[in-house]
Image: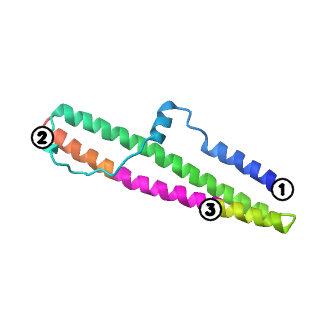
C-alpha cells in the first residue's frame, strides 16, 4: 500500500516538475531530429546574400529547437532522479521483503532513466555546438560580403 502511495506521489511530483509541452512550437521543436553538420562546407563562399540569410535563419531555428530538446531532457533526468530518491525512501519503510524489493527495483529503473536522459542531453549539447559553429561561419561570410 505504501509503495502504491509513494508511486502516486512520485508521479505527481514528476508531472508538476516536467509539465507538458502545450505550445505548438515547443511540440514541433521536441519532435525534430538533427544530424551532425559540417562547420565549413564547400560552396559557402559562393552563396549569395539571400542564400546566406536563409541558411543563417535555418541554423538559428535548429539551435532554438536543440535548446528546447536539451531543456526537456534535463527536466526528465531531474524527474527520474526525484523518483529514484522517493523509491529509496519508500523502501526504508517497506512493510515486508517483497515491498522492499519492489522499491529497490523502482529506484534502479529511475536511476537508469535519469542516466539515459542525461546522456542524451549531453549528446544534444555537442550537436548544438556544431550548429552554433556553423552559424558563426555563416555570419562571418555574411558580414565579409557586406550583406545587409
Q: Few, some or many C-alpha atoms within 10 Å of disc 2 (few <14, some 14-19, many ≥20)? A: few
Query: Label 1 to label 3, Cα distance in Å?
Result: 20 Å
Q: Earlier in the sequence, mark 2 or mark 1?
A: 1
Q: Quadrant of the N terminus?
A: bottom right
Task: Report the disc number at residue 91.
Answer: none
Q: Which residues are magenta?
A: 110-129
Query: Label 2 to label 3, Cα distance in Å?
Result: 50 Å
| 114 within the magenta span | yes
**Residue 144 point in image, percent of width and height:** 14, 41
Q: Few, some or many C-alpha atoms within 10 Å of disc 1 (few <14, some 14-19, many ≥20)? A: few
Q: Earlier in the sequence, mark 1 or mark 3?
A: 1
Name the residue at 50% across, 47% down.
71
Name the residue at 55% across, 61% down.
115
**Residue 131 point in image, percent of width and height:** 32, 48
Q: Is residue 87 above or below residue 11?
A: below
Q: Which residue is label 3 attached to?
A: 111
Q: Which residue is label 1 attached to?
A: 2
**Residue 30 point in image, percent of width and height:** 48, 41
- Residue 19 picture quarter: top right
In-front residue for pair 143/78? 78
Q: Which residue is label 2 attached to?
A: 46
Q: Few, some or many C-alpha atoms within 10 Å of disc 3 (few <14, some 14-19, many ≥20)? A: some
Q: Is residue 124 above or below residue 144?
A: below
Q: Is residue 2 above or below residue 20?
A: below
Query: Label 2 to label 1, Cα distance in Å?
Result: 67 Å
In-front residue for pair 100/89? 100
**Residue 101 point in image, percent of width and height:** 77, 66
Q: Element type at marker 2? A: helix
Residues at discs 2 and 3 in contact (Cβ within 8 Å): no
Name the residue at 81% across, 51% down.
5
Amino acid at each position: 500500500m505504501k509503495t502504491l502511495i509513494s508511486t502516486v506521489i512520485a508521479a505527481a511530483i514528476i508531472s508538476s516538475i516536467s509539465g507538458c509541452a502545450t505550445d505548438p512550437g515547443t511540440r514541433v521543436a521536441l519532435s525534430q531530429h538533427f544530424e551532425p553538420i559540417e562547420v565549413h562546407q564547400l560552396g559557402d563562399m559562393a552563396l549569395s546574400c539571400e542564400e546566406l540569410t536563409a541558411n543563417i535563419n535555418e541554423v538559428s531555428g535548429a539551435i532554438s529547437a536543440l535548446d528546447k530538446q536539451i531543456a526537456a531532457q534535463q527536466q526528465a533526468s531531474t524527474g527520474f532522479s526525484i523518483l529514484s530518491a522517493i523509491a529509496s525512501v519508500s523502501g526504508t519503510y517497506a512493510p515486508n521483503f517483497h515491498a522492499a524489493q519492489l522499491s529497490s527495483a523502482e529506484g534502479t529503473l529511475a536511476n537508469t532513466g535519469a542516466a539515459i536522459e542525461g546522456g542524451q542531453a549531453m549528446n544534444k549539447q555537442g550537436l548544438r555546438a556544431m550548429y552554433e559553429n556553423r552559424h558563426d561561419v555563416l555570419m562571418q561570410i555574411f558580414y565579409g560580403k557586406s550583406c545587409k
